Image: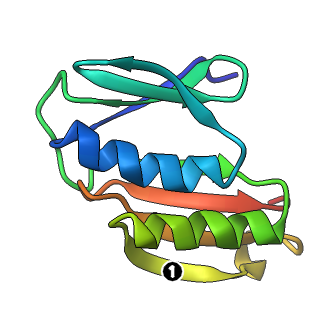
Amino acid sequence: MIHHVSVEVADLERSGRFYDAVLGALGWRRLTEEPDHIAWGIVKPVFYASTRHPVAPGGGHVAFAANSIPAVKASYEGGLAAGGTDQGPPRQRPEYGPTYYSAYLLDPDGNRIEIAVGTT
């Protein structure tokens, strides 16, 4: 089980807006906000955007679970509206399983974000 995940970002305010849009559509909320990081989760902080270390563009891939196809679409659209870059629009992805549906974005710092529902 994963305890938490962190990505390094250059501009915490900009990344905060991006992840608020992506994760808010999945039912997550900001649970911690400090000068050098913001953390989101449902019950406890599990995903952090941090300015503690240098940014390594394209250095990560994080997949967030959605509860439904509409949630995947809302998260993807929210991410685009908040400065994300399309890396693969919402669609069925049978190469990952018969019920796998996902979308891909780059966050403002180049980290690859996936929003998915279904099984692999």
- The residue depicted at 58 percent of the width and 47 percent of the height is 23
Is 120 positioned to the left or the right of 9 in the image? right
Q: Residue at x 54, y 55 (%)?
A: 22
**Residue ID at (79%, 71%):** 70
The extreme left residue here reads 54
The structure residue drawn at horizontal position 61% and vertical position 63%, both measured from the top left corner, is 75
Out of 30 and 86, give the one closest to the viewer. 30
x then y, percent, for residue 24 = 61, 48
Amino acid at circle 1: Gly
Confirm whether residue 53 shows in the render: yes
Q: Is residue 32 above or below residue 108?
A: above
Dot 1: element: strand
Of 36 and 4, the residue lying toward us: 36
The outermost residue toward the right is 98
65 w.r.t. 98: above or below: above
> Residue 48 appears at what percent x and percent y?
42, 28
* Viewer can see residue 100: no
Q: Which residue is mark 1?
A: 88
Q: Quadrant of residue 38?
A: top left
Q: Position of residue 16 (x, y in %)?
A: 36, 42
Asked if 16 appears above or below 110 in the picture, the reply is above
Report how many numbered discs are placed on residues in the image. 1
Image coordinates for residue 84, horizontal then vertical, percent: 36, 67
- Image quadrant occupied by the N terminus: top right
